[in-house]
Amino acid sequence: MLDPTFVDKLVERLRPEAVLVSPHHVLVYECDGSTAFRQTPDAAVLPATTEDVAAAIRTCVEHDVPFVGRGAGTGLSGGATPAEGGVVISLAGMNQLLELDLDNRLARCQTGIVNLQISKKVAEHGLYFAPDPSSQSACTLGGNIAENSGGPHCFKYGATTAHVVGLTVVLPTGEVVELGGPQDGVGYDLVGLFVGSEGTFGIATEALVRLMPKPESVKTLLAAFRSMVAACEAVSDIVATGIVPAALEMLDRPTIEVVEAGVVAAGYPTDAEAVLLIELDGAHHGMERMEREIRNACEARGAVSFTVARNEEEQARLWLGRKAAFGAMGRLSTDLYVQDGVVPRSRLPEVLEKVGEIAARYRIKVANVFHAGDGNLHPCIPYDGRDEEERHRVLEAGREILELCVAVGGSISGEHGIGREKSSYMDLLFSEHDLNLMRALREVWNPAGLCNPNKIFPTSHGCGEAMSLPSVAAVPGAWI
Ligand SMILES: Cc1cc2nc3c(=O)[nH]c(=O)nc-3n(C[C@H](O)[C@H](O)[C@H](O)COP(=O)(O)OP(=O)(O)OC[C@H]3O[C@@H](n4cnc5c(N)ncnc54)[C@H](O)[C@@H]3O)c2cc1C
């Protein structure tokens, strides 16, 4: 329950319509895309400017109230969930492209801008913003920055951090600072440090981002395989040719079925065990040769079909199937747990097989759709969140999948972050000494600990949902 003088002060410093406190208004901010983790905030504010954000944070600091920044809430690790209540600061209304510097291919944007809007707004100049999370039609630049988001084309172009040049940040004390900038290159890389800090170092209100020239030529290819192992081996073979595709994405049979039956007829063969979506981009010259080499690599691994999109419409259809895959799974169950782990590319076949074994033991379904080129797995587990026992089983299976990723030399997150969901798994990767170093760094930025508390690190009282779950007897059996 918030102190009424706190709310009065927020209203006075922002505007009455920018402060939401009624339970049915704030309910919408109780979780992100990871619906297994919920906490209703006490209030939400809707700033229009950097000064509004600073005023909201200063008010929180004066009253010792926790706060968390929020973009579109598409995060998949509970990052924007207000774990300790308090105030959600929603950046969604701060969505303008403020300046376009064509000579230097830079854009200054408010961070509530939707990722895809940046590319749309600069398309007439032959430019685009390269980081392309599959949620790009909804997620915001601020969320991308906080999570250092990846996306299909980040295999070639790098994750968000490679595309952010400068930031305007409201620190957790309420002070406004400028980090980086076009000429920056001296001293600590504070922009690099902020990107990926999962909303715990302050709230970014503006960002200067790099734009890329659209490639002269793009080819979108789809190879279908009778086995997942063959498809994974083809991925390693393609990389071994020395060609760097713009994207290398994999969908397994359960995903193909749900995509084809649901959102869109993408044209994926429903009798395939796996399809590999490959994109090449660059100069016209050399495209035919690269296509031929990739076709050879796929056929050498037994590809049963190899399709080349003939025009932009066909390219878009093949991509829509991939980008709408998580959404299409909505037809399977009320909730979806999207796991995010990384493994060395060469270990993909055995890891996917073991993921199937884990699923069978926990009596859950798993559909795999993932960034194969990066070894970044996304086992998707549809479940009914109203069934506590099932929810526990799903989280336990998720934990085993991550333990498996770490055991083969991988990591517990490729791009969705640690957030609330994985804080209790950090010690699978890091020693207490490492964690204390990271905590010390957080304290420099966020001394009072009010900015997005109870995230990333295991805490004594919030030691992660999954860790506190009763252990579930894993029962051998067929998929449901
Ligand atoms: C269908 C679907 C597909 C997805 N595909 C991908 C993918 O391909 N690659 C990928 O990396 N992720 C993917 N995601 C996850 C998610 O979309 C990304 O993490 C995205 O960057 C989150 O953006 P958002 O605006 O929704 O952030 P939110 O969910 O609102 O917030 C995420 C985190 O960012 C912080 N934050 C938000 N705005 C700011 C700000 N301005 N300043 C500081 N901190 C801030 C929040 O506090 C929170 O910790 C997908 C999600 C879905 C639902």
Image (tube, rainbow, N blue to C red):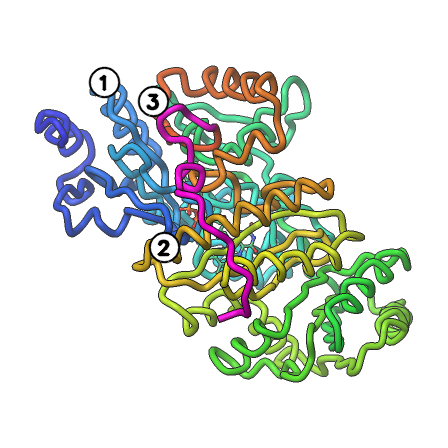
Magenta-highlighted residues: 458-480
Q: Earlier in the sequence, mark 2 or mark 3?
A: 3
Q: Earlier in the sequence, mark 1 or mark 2?
A: 1
Q: Amino acid at mark 1?
A: Glu
Q: Amino acid at mark 3?
A: Gly
Q: Is residue 98 visible?
A: no
Query: Looking at the image, is 14 positioned above or below residue 266?
Result: above
What residue did someone put label 2 on?
A: 389
The answer for how far apart the CA atoms under marks 1 and 2 are is 42 Å
Question: Residue placed at 52% from the left, 52% from the top?
Answer: 397
What residue did someone put label 1 on?
A: 62
**Of tags 2 and 3, which is closer to the observer?**
2
Question: Residue placed at 36% from the left, 53% from the top?
Answer: 35
Callout 3: CB less than 8 Å from ligand 1: no
The answer for how far apart the CA atoms under marks 2 and 3 are is 43 Å
Q: Secondary structure at mark 3?
A: loop
The image position of residue 357, as x and y in percent, is 62, 60
Number of the label disc, if any, that sits on residue 174: 3
Q: Secondary structure at mark 2?
A: helix
Query: Looking at the image, is 107 positioned above or below residue 338?
Result: above
Q: Is residue 425 magenta?
A: no
Q: Residues within 10 Å of mark 3 (few under 14, many from 20)?
A: many
Question: Residue placed at 53% from the left, 76% from the top?
Answer: 259
Which residue reaches farthest left?
A: 4
Closest to the observer, 95 or 352: 352
Closest to the observer, 198 or 36: 36
Closest to the observer, 217 or 134: 134
**391 relative position to 231: left or right:** left
